[in-house]
Structures are given as structure tokens and as C-alpha cells.
Amino acid sequence: MMKALILNSGLGHRMGVLTSEHPKCMTEISATETILSRQLHLLADAGIEEVVMTTGYFHEVLERYCESLALPLHITFVENTLYDKTNYIYSIWCARKELQDCDVLLMHGDLVFQNTVFDAVVEAPGSCMTVSSTLPLPEKDFKAVLDGGFVRKVGIEFFDNAVAAQPLYKLTKDDWKLWLDKIGEFCAAGNTGVYAENALNQISAACSIRPLDFKDDLCAEIDNPQDLEVVYKRLQEVENRSVYMCFSTDIIHSGHVAIIRKAQRLGRLTIGVLSDEATASYKRFPIIPFQERKTLMASLGGVYKVVEQKTLSYKDNLLALKPDIVVHGDDWREGFQKPIRQEVLDVLATYGGKLVEFPYSRDARLAELEKLSRAQLAMPDLRRGRLRKLLEMKGLVTAIEAHSGITGLIAENTTVLQDGKTYQFDAMWLSSLCDSTAKGKPDIELVDMTSRFRTVDDIMEVTTKPIIFDGDTGGLAEHFVYTVRSLERMGVSMVIIEDKVGLKKNSLFGTDVPQTQDSIENFCAKISAGKKAQKTHDFMICARIESLILERGLDDALQRARAYVVAGADAIMIHSRKADPAEIFAFAEAFRAQDQTTPLVVVPTAFNSVTEDEFKRRGVNVVIYANQLTRSGFPAMQKAAESILANHRAKEADALCMPIKDIINLIPEE
Ligand code: SPV
Ligand code: MG
């Protein structure tokens, strides 16, 4: 148990008229606080409920004032009736009964300290006294003599091996008992006109009081109106400092609350809330959308302002807000956030800002909560609608093919950090080509729907990202409606069906093989039947136009696009097998001229020189990397197999293989 002991018996005669009607501790030091109210607020905030206050001069005024503050504190007042004839050594002795068997936080009633200094004293592991290694030694005030890392003497007369010191101490029960007993001896001998520290100096060798260095922070006594003016200004400076933190979380846990509380102690706290887009790209899709996360943060007590942080990089917000201090957990010193941290340091250095890092405290329940959030994101109802949300949020969505649990995990987890931004794929493409290839079968709708759904299920089991399903031709309209319902029920976000009939061949063969395009009427009927069959608003049916593949020309493609949208298609995919993107660009331009809203999908396997940015500029909304994992994975396997055959052992193949440890890391265990 810790009690605070505040010494308020003294006269404070050097304050002039300021103390003509009340004791010095009631002197105002800001628009809202007196020296005493500030001390008491800090104690209450730190949860120190027991306060012993020695009084004397204007003791009734003081007691009434303390009551009027109505703080959650239990204050025991001990009056030193000889306040004008004795020093505070005697006041302490008067209060001895209230100060048995407890740790003591001792402070003079005219001491003003900033909250971070107070926190450091309260949190110190053992006994300590506040000192400053950087302030000049005061001529007439307390100095502490240090030896071997401990405070050995305190007084105004010591100058050798001494540092400036302030009468703010934390004393463990044992150290305090030694001091208090010695104070008793002094008082019994009538030695009541000296500092209590004179008694301390006699027993300090038996104590372990460490110096707590507040350096240039504010911790000062107010003895006269000049001191008051200085402290008033310093306090204003300290309290008006702006502090910035950024959060992406949608789960606020005790670790967050603790660091927010610490940040608030440093000044006026502005919280940046990471945008949905930036959050989705670096961690996972937020379960709670940006506006709600913003409201949540704003509702926390003591938060001055909440702003959006659009990117993982702090740069724009730091340059706009110019906070004096940025606060972060120390966990970002390593790992992928390291460059973000460096950028923060660089930007702060341009205007003299400071980075304050607190030890990162991971709430033990967080991993569990995070797992629950991910599980939730993977659930069909939450997953299905996310493609529409991403389209709205980002304008351009990327998808990569996945054809198994492991390729699903690669699509889910691969992250690249570039220029302060993180990049991940937004969605997964369940390619018929790759699903068939993985099974060693041609891409001719030979792998049946039951098997294709099995692949979807394998991927869904281990991922959370939305899925775009390659529905080939969709089969007969009568069959397609069942496919739509099944996919929708499973939580797939979009099915793409292509306007071909008969034995479907892969589009990349083009006209090298016989392929028949469906009639507009037939295909529209299939789309309409599918749209009628679906049960939710979330699910999307995308109509894929094969006119360019089959060399039917731009006009045919555009005519079809118009008709398919009227039939209910939620998106249009235009395909081409030419390396030159000209026909894709021509379609995009003409399509956007006739339709500004329907999402446009492309699969740039052949025209792979075009960047996502350029596609976006040209009105494309979904870019599907349709087969790159398959095409890169299988040759690597072939090489390893050849190496083993050629060397008649596996040693040489090892260089081509991922270490087993990495495989284990790739696959999370429940
Ligand atoms: C697939 O990935 O199966 C596709 C795209 O349908 S393409 O192979 O280009 O036809
Ligand atoms: Mg396909």
C-alpha cells in the first residue's frame, strides 16, 4: 500500500500578496489548476487514494478547498500547530501514526512537476528521489550527493558530486521506517528547526534511494512570484504539446488503452485512424469500418482530435499536423514497419519533433481475438460481400489465381512493402485452367463442379479473402442456376461466365481451335436466370466477352457488353490474347463512353506489360493474374525432379527447395 504525504504546513512568506489569504499550495499555476489541485489530480489518476497532508498556516481554508475538489481521495489532515516555529521535520513527526507500514510518496506542497516525471517516480521499482543531471546546481536549494548509483546526502550545503534535487521522493516501507524513526529521534531531542533531510543523511547509507533523473523536464518548487511565472509558462508549453498516434485496430484492448493513457500524459493527443484501404492492405480487412473506428477513438476520454491516416506512411499527416511528439510501441523497430519508423524519424527531424516509444504490451487475449476476427472474415456472409466493398473502396481490385489450400495461403499472405505502402492481393481467382492443370486435366470443363467446389472449400478453409470463381461457360442455364446458388451459399463473391457454347477450350488458344461463341439472346437468358436464382445482393455475376479472342471485332464486343448489362450482369470481363493491349484499351474506352459504372474486368496474361495504374486510368476495375502461380510453380517442381534423377540423390535439389521450416511457417496451425 502506498500513501502520499504532502507537506503544506509552511508559511510561504516569499510569495507576497499571493499567499495573503491561503497557503502557498493554493496558488494558481494554470487557468484551471492550483499547485495542490494538480498534485491531487495526478495522485487520483494514478490510483493512489490515501493522502496524508500536514497543515498549519490557513489550515481551515486548505481543508475546505480540498473537499471542494471532490476527488476520489481519502485525505487525512494533520495540523502542525507549531507551524511558525518548526520546520517540516516536525510536521512529519506529527503525522507519524498515519504513516506506519506503508510505502510513501513524499512531496513538498509547493512542488510542480509534469505528469511524466510523476509517473516515473510512481513506477520506479524501489525508493527514489527526483534529481536533474542537466540543470545547474542551485545556490540555495536542495542538492543530492550521489555515490555508487544511490543518493547519499541531501541538503543545500553540498556541492561536490552533487546534482540538483527536488523534494519528490518515493520511499519503500523499509527505507521510510528508517527515516521516520530518525526523524523521531531528532524531534525528541528538540531538533525541530532543521530539514527532515538532516535526519535522512544519518541513515541514508542503510537505504537504497536511487536518483531519478528528470533532466530538463518540469519539476520545480515555487518559492516566489518569479518562480511562478516560469512554471506557468513551462506548464503551458508542456500541456499544449501536440502528440500523435496512429491506430489501425478494430479491437481495442488493454495494451492500446495503456499506451493511449501514456501518450495523453505527454500532451494533447491526436489519434490517426488508418483508412480501410490501408488497413486491408497491411493487415486484414477491418471488421469495423473506418467511420465506426473513428467514432470509437473519438469517444475515448482525453482524445483531443481524431483524423484519418490514409496510408501506412505517417508522412502526410505529420507534415500537415506537425506534432511535437509521435508515440508508438517499440515493436516497430524490427520487421516490416521498420522503414515506416525510419520515415517518421526523418520527417520529425525536419522540424524538431520527437519520437517516444513505449514497450509494446501484447494483450494475451489479442491473438485469440485476432483469430476470431479472421474466422469471422472467412465466414460466407462476411466474405461474399467484401468484393463489392473493395471495389467501392479502391476502384481497382487485384486478384491472383489459387487452386489449392497452399496457393490460397500465398494469395492471402504475400505482402510487399514499397515506398511506405504495403501491397497485397485483394482477392483470389479460382481459374478453371489452373484447377484443371493441378489435376492433370485439360481446361475443357472436364473437371466437374463437385470437384471445383471441393477446391473452393479447400481454399476457403485457410483464407479470408474474397473469391472470384471461373465458371467457364456456366453450362446450361438450367444448370447454371444451381451453380450460382451453391457458390453464393459457399461465400464466393463473383462468378465469371464466358459467352461460349459446346466444347469449351481455353481462350488462350483463340481461333487455333474450334470454339463457338454463344448468341447474345442465349447468353443473356443465362445471365438473367442466374441473377434471378441468387438470394443475396452481394453476389455478382460477371459476363465475359470472347469477341476479341474469336476475332469478331470491337463492335460485337461492345454490343454484347450493352446487352449483358441489361440482362443483369454485375460486371463485364473483356478478354484478349494479344500482347499488344491496343484492343483492350479500345474496348475500355468505348465501354466507358457507354457505361460509366459497371465494373470492368481484365486478365492480362498476354498483354502483361500494362501496369495496374494504367488499367485504373483507363477505367478497369478488376485485374486478374490468372495463372502465374501455376506457371511458376510447376517448372520449379520439374527442375527439382530432373535434378534428383540426374544426380541420383536429393542433395543438389536442396538449393531449389524451400526449407522445411519455411513451409511450417507458411502454414498456420490452429
Ligand atoms: C482461366 O484462368 O481459367 C481463364 C483465363 O479462364 S484464360 O486462361 O486466359 O482463359
Ligand atoms: Mg478458365
Image (cartoon, helix red, strand yellow):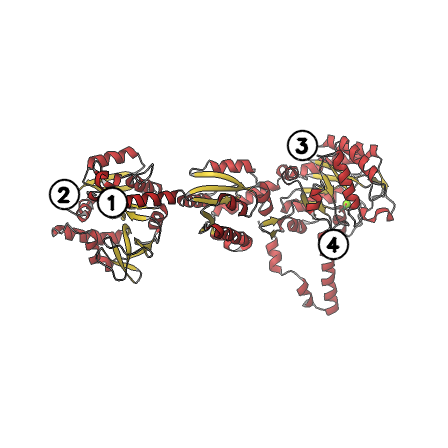
x 75%, y 42%: residue = 449
What residue is shown with label 2? 82
Give residue 212's quadrant in the image. bottom left
- The residues tagged by marks 2 and 1 sit, at their Cα atoms, a distance apart of 23 Å
Q: Horizontally, is 532 left or right of 267 in the view? A: right
Image location of residue 433, percent across then percent down: 77, 48
Tag nearer the camera, 3 or 1: 1
Chain-order first, disc 3 or disc 2: 2
Q: Secondary structure at mark 3?
A: loop
x 33%, y 50%: residue = 121
Give residue 258's quadrant in the image. top left
For disc 4, the neighbor class at 10 Å (few under 14, some 14 to 19, many from 20) is: few
Chain-order first, disc 4 or disc 2: 2
What residue is shown with label 3? 537
Q: Secondary structure at mark 2?
A: loop
Chain-order first, disc 4 or disc 1: 1
Amino acid type at mark 2? Leu
Q: Nearer the viewer, residue 137 or 146?
A: 137
Q: Secondary structure at mark 1?
A: loop
What residue is shown with label 4? 631
What residue is shown with label 1? 224
Chain-order first, disc 3 or disc 1: 1
Q: Secondary structure at mark 4?
A: helix
- The residues tagged by marks 4 and 2 sit, at their Cα atoms, a distance apart of 93 Å
Amino acid type at mark 3? His
Tag nearer the camera, 4 or 2: 2
Q: Residue furthest left?
A: 190
Q: Quadrant of ligand 2?
A: top right
How many numbered marks have been drawn onto this rendered protein structure? 4
